[in-house]
Image (tube, grey):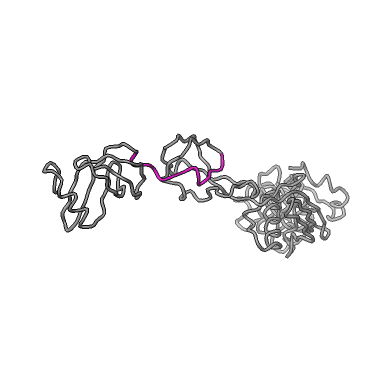
């Protein structure tokens, strides 16, 4: 905070106020000794005006509340003023019972509508997206050539900030923006330059994933990349690969490709499996050996270890193949030796 902001305004303050009166007896008494309707000095004042009045400083100021005391600090800034000086000038302006109420200083803050770099980025992104009409503001990353200073606009203005000109090249992302903001003395212009890049959210791994490992939701993160760097088969939705297995070992922090994942192999070539056939409430099982590998739902070849026939079935679980049916297949299976169980 600026110390005693009055000192910065010098003659302007002196011309604003009538002559100061001496401190009245009892003016620093506690409020409870001066009646419930006595003026009470606020420890902090927030104003949007360029003038601070008695009513800004004091509760219960009555008719004297509109009398000006000091000029406000600059928009968006604050300053300290001596409570004794406030009371002295308030009494001189007509509030005879004004006191300090035990305060040494009063903080005066000038309200403003502030626009920092983040807020300006959002405004620029919205304007460029609306101007192009084919992109979303959320997909634009704004990088300034030089970080702009915070803009403090007058809150009393109906149009505190407006864009006068917006030039943007989608080819290289460069933009040139001219803005105007409401100050105490009319609108002021400011120019901002930088790059607006179109971004795409892609899926990456939070930690390494071994070959054959199943992808879980907690394994994945989302990161944003410039659109031109996103691969054609990049994973953009975690649900696309959750539950799938990695074809190769995967490193974290890199965009993932759909081609690097597959349905997990529940059966490998040469695995011993259980063959299951169900029809009309009857379930037949026997042992077999996988001639090919398969994921859930795949059709694979299996050698029936009892009959030595090769049959085709659907992988239904790890180590389990279900045979789909025709009476011919059923007849082949029911001709198996008695060791095959009927359940």
Counting from the top left corner in percent of width and height, residue 25 is at 72, 48
Q: Is residue 97 visible?
A: no
Tell whether 341 sits left or right of 149: left
Tell whether 152 sits left or right of 40: right
Of the 4 image quadrants, the one containing the N terminus is top right
Q: In percent of the image, x 15 and y 45: which residue is there? A: 336
Counting from the top left corner in percent of width and height, residue 172 is at 74, 50
Tell whether 252 sits left or right of 80: left
Q: How many marks?
A: 0
Q: Nearer the viewer, residue 273 or 29?
A: 273
Q: Is residue 288 above or below residue 138?
A: above
Q: Nearer the viewer, residue 219 or 100?
A: 219
Q: Is residue 259 visible?
A: yes
Magenta stretch: residue 263 in it?
yes
Q: Nearer the viewer, residue 153 or 2?
A: 153
Q: In percent of the image, x 30 and y 45: which residue is there? A: 317
Counting from the top left corner in percent of width and height, residue 257 is at 53, 45
Tell me which segment is drawn in magenta: 254-268
Counting from the top left corner in percent of width and height, residue 287 is at 21, 41
Q: In percent of the image, x 19 and y 56: which residue is there? A: 279
Magenta stretch: residue 174 in it?
no
Q: Is residue 267 above or below residue 59?
A: above
């Amino acid at each position: 905070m600026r110390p005693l902001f009055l000192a910065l305004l010098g003659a302007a303050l002196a011309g604003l106020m009538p002559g100061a009166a001496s401190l009245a007896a009892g003016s620093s008494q506690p409020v409870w000794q001066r009646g419930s309707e006595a003026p009470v000095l606020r420890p902090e004042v927030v104003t949007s005006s360029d003038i601070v009045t008695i009513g800004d400083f004091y509760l219960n100021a009555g008719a004297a509340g509109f009398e000006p005391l000091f000029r406000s600090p600059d928009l968006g800034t604050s300053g300290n003023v001596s409570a004794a000086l406030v009371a002295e000038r308030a009494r001189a302006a007509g509030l005879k019972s004004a006191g300090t109420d035990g305060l040494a200083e009063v903080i005066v803050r000038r309200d403003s509508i502030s626009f920092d770099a983040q807020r300006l980025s959002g405004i620029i992104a919205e304007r460029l997206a609306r101007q192009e009409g084919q992109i979303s503001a959320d997909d634009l990353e704004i990088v300034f050539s030089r970080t702009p200073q915070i803009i403090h606009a007058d809150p009393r203005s109906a149009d505190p900030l407006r864009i006068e000109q917006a030039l943007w090249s989608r080819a290289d992302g460069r933009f040139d923006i001219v803005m105007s903001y409401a100050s105490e003395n009319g609108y002021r212009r400011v120019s901002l330059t930088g790059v607006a890049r179109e971004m795409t959210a892609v899926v990456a791994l939070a930690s390494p994933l071994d070959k054959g490992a199943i992808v879980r939701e907690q394994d994945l993160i989302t990161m944003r990349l410039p659109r031109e760097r996103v691969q054609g088969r990049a994973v953009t939705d975690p649900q696309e690969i959750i539950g799938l297995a990695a074809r190769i070992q995967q490193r974290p922090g890199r965009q993932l490709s759909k081609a690097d994942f597959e349905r997990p192999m529940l059966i490998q070539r040469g695995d011993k499996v259980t063959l299951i056939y169900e029809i009309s409430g009857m379930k037949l099982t026997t042992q077999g050996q996988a001639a090919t590998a398969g994921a859930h739902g795949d059709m694979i070849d299996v050698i029936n270890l009892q009959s030595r026939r090769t049959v085709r079935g659907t992988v239904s679980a790890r180590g389990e193949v279900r045979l789909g049916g025709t009476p011919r297949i059923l007849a082949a299976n029911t001709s198996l030796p008695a060791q095959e169980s009927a359940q």
